[in-house]
């Protein structure tokens, strides 16, 4: 064969090897494959409704952290890597991580004890805040995630899916944001592409984190998949105070405006405004105390070297990512009726898997 033809064939095979495999946009088949992978790592009873993944190989399973977090690395037959993050398990420290829901800055550092420090930037906006418990969970998973990405990159993998369900979905948000910062700082290669599926995920941070995350993953590169009957994505509790608004807002000048009103109107309106403002500030303070300081005393039993971080004055939790709403229909409600005896009936993998087949049947 002539040298020119050999060179041409080599070029074609090389371009094929590095051709983009992940595409923007929600893909029902791709999402269900992520559910299949997640189903393999949970410790609950398996079901035949969710089949075993066919074109994926598990390469790595991380150690379990003190708060029971772990993740797995899978590889698709076309070379795409998958970071699959486990959700809540039926053990106390795993639940405590969820309830440790005070907010901390989305950029900062966590002192982990024994001179260990986890430095992170999860948003560009200095007003962005995130859930302290899940940020601690991220700090436990991040070192091995970065290590395995770099290892797989050396073998030719340039594209990764990030997936988690429930608590795993919350951690998937933070993981994606954390990796974006490492790319910006050139601590991991800049030609890596990420696509994220946050399934049944609770809210990871405040409005400014959500803005930042949605801008980062715009044009179809991150989805939050929600069963409209599932209560978990409605958590944590959200309290909006006047300080949660952008700085240019009508409330900034409301007191001078009220002073211009007639006497009686000024007294009545000022009293109403002060009561509303005071009520939200008191509620935020109470939530910060109970979900911060009090929960830390329980977390400390499992993370013995963890100093208590400083909490932000905020509790305005918002969901993030492009939403894919799985709306229950009559057939679904007959199969999965509301039940006070099973509060997770709409949160489990099978309802999500089945509803996704209804609305996004795929190929």
Image (cartoon, rainbow, N blue to C red):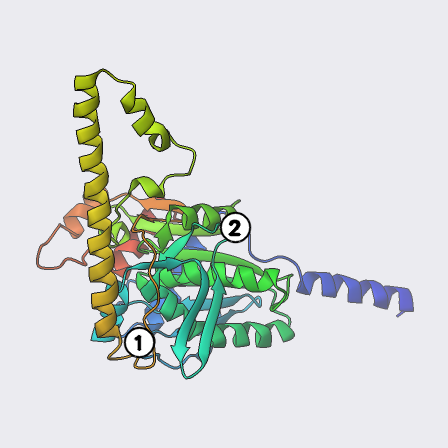
> Which structural element holds mark 2?
helix
The residue at the point 90 percent across, 64 percent down is: 4
The residue at the point 37 percent across, 39 percent down is: 245
Quadrant of the rendering where the N terminus is positioned:
bottom right
According to the picture, the residue beneath numbered tag 1 turns out to be: 68
Please tell me whether residue 5 is drawn above or below residue 298 in the rendered image: above
Q: Position of residue 363 (x, y in %)?
A: 45, 50
Residue pushed farthest left? 341
> Which structural element holds mark 1?
loop
Q: Quadrant of residue 250?
A: top left
Residue pushed farthest bottom? 114
Please tell me whether residue 208 is drawn above or below residue 114 in the rendered image: above
Q: Position of residue 169 (x, y in %)?
A: 36, 60
Please tell me whether residue 181 is drawn above or below residue 71 in the rendered image: above
Q: Which mark is residue 361?
A: none
Please tell me whether residue 34 is drawn above or below residue 217 in the rendered image: below
Q: Position of residue 89 (x, y in %)?
A: 25, 71
> Which of these two is toward me, 46 or 160?
160
- Say left or right for 39 vs 1: left
Circle 2 residues within 10 Å: few <14, some 14–19, many ≥20: some
> Which of these two is toward me, 336 or 185?
185
How many marks the image carries: the answer is: 2
Q: Is residue 177 among what the camera can see?
A: yes
Q: Position of residue 82 (x, y in %)?
A: 48, 67
Q: Which mark is residue 216?
A: 2
Q: Quadrant of residue 80?
A: bottom right
- Say left or right for 239 vs 107: left
Q: In the rendered structure, which disc, 1 or 2, sits on the residue that comes first in sequence?
A: 1
Q: Is residue 91 among what the camera can see?
A: no
> Which of these two is toward me, 260 or 338?
260
The residue at the point 48 percent across, 54 percent down is: 123
What is the spatial separation of the Cα atoms under label 1 and label 2, in whole angstroms? 29 Å
């Amino acid at each position: 064969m002539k040298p020119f033809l050999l060179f041409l064939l080599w070029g074609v095979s090389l371009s094929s090897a590095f051709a983009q495999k992940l595409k923007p946009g929600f893909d029902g088949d791709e999402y269900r494959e992520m559910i299949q992978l997640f189903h393999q790592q949970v410790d609950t009873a398996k079901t035949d409704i969710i089949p075993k993944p066919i074109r994926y190989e598990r390469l790595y399973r991380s150690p379990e952290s003190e708060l029971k977090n772990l993740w797995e690395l899978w590889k698709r037959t076309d070379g795409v890597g998958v970071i699959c993050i486990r959700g809540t398990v039926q053990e106390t420290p795993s639940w405590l991580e969820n309830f440790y829901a005070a907010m901390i800055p989305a950029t900062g550092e966590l002192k982990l004890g024994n001179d260990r420090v986890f430095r992170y930037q999860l948003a560009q906006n200095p007003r962005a805040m995130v859930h302290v418990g899940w940020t601690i969970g991220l700090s436990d998973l991040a070192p091995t995630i970065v290590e395995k990405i770099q290892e797989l990159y050396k073998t030719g993998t340039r594209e990764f899916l990030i997936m988690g369900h429930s608590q795993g979905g919350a951690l998937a948000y933070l993981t994606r944001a954390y990796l974006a910062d490492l790319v910006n700082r050139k601590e991991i290669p800049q030609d890596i592409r990420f696509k994220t599926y946050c399934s049944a995920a609770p809210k990871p941070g405040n409005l400014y984190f959500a803005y930042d995350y949605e801008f980062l993953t715009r044009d179809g590169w991150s989805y939050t998949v929600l069963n409209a009957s599932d209560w978990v994505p409605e958590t944590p509790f959200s309290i909006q105070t006047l300080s949660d608004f952008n700085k240019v807002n009508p409330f900034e000048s409301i007191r001078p405006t009220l002073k211009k009103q007639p006497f009686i109107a000024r007294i009545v309106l000022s009293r109403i405004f002060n009561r509303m403002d005071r009520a939200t500030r008191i509620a935020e303070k109470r939530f910060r105390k109970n979900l911060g300081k009090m929960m830390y005393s329980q977390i400390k039993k499992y993370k013995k070297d963890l100093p208590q971080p400083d909490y932000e004055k905020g509790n305005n939790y918002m969901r993030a990512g492009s939403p894919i709403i799985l709306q229950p229909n009559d057939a679904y409600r007959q199969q999965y009726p509301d039940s006070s005896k099973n509060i997770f009936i709409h949160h489990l993998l099978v309802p999500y898997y089945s509803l996704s087949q209804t609305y996004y049947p795929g190929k």
